[in-house]
């Protein structure tokens, strides 16, 4: 968890901070797994056509690589955009 998330917990007792940090870590792990599963499912459905071999055919492998690359670039771009918007958002004091 990054320092900006912990900054919002400054007024809490240490035990509550640890509980909140653990919950945030669990949520981040859950979100990462959801993203990974979404990536696998999407690229598999879009790229794998044949089940005649144990391994992917060359065009399927190329498609999966492109699909994964696009998905990850998109995810990074969305994350950067949210960070930009978050920095420009007014803070509550």
Image (tube, rainbow, N blue to C red):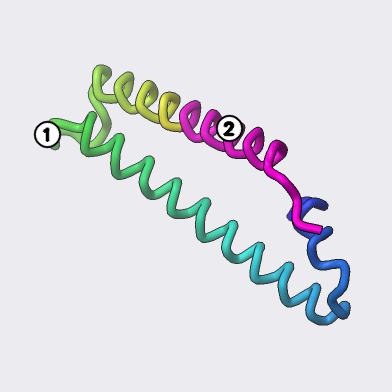
Left or right: residue 38 versus residue 14 is left
Residues in magenta, as a range: 72-93
**Which-is-in-front pick, marks 1 and 2?**
2
Magenta: main secondary structure: helix
Left or right of 59, for residue 11? right
Question: Circle 1 sits in a helix, a strand or a loop, which is it?
Answer: loop
Q: Which residue is mark 1?
A: 52
Q: Earlier in the sequence, mark 1 or mark 2?
A: 1
Q: Quadrant of the C terminus?
A: bottom right
Q: Residue 77 at what x, y percent from top left?
A: 54, 29
Question: For this view, does 55 lie left or right of residue 84?
Answer: left
Residue 13 found in image quarter? bottom right
Q: Position of residue 53 (x, y in %)?
A: 18, 33
Residue at 37% over, 21% down: 66
Quadrant assignment, res 27: bottom right
Disc 2 secondary structure class? helix
**Residue 15: image location, x then y, percent:** 83, 81
* Disc 2: which residue: 81
């Amino acid at each position: 968890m990054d320092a900006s998330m912990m900054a919002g917990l400054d007024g809490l007792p240490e035990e509550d901070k640890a509980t909140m940090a653990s919950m945030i870590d669990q949520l981040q792990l859950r979100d990462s797994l959801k993203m990974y599963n979404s990536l696998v499912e999407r690229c598999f459905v879009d790229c794998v056509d044949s089940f005649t071999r144990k391994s992917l055919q060359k065009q399927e492998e190329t498609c999966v690589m492109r699909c994964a690359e696009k998905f990850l670039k998109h995810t990074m771009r969305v994350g950067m955009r949210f960070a930009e918007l978050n920095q420009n958002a007014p803070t509550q004091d």
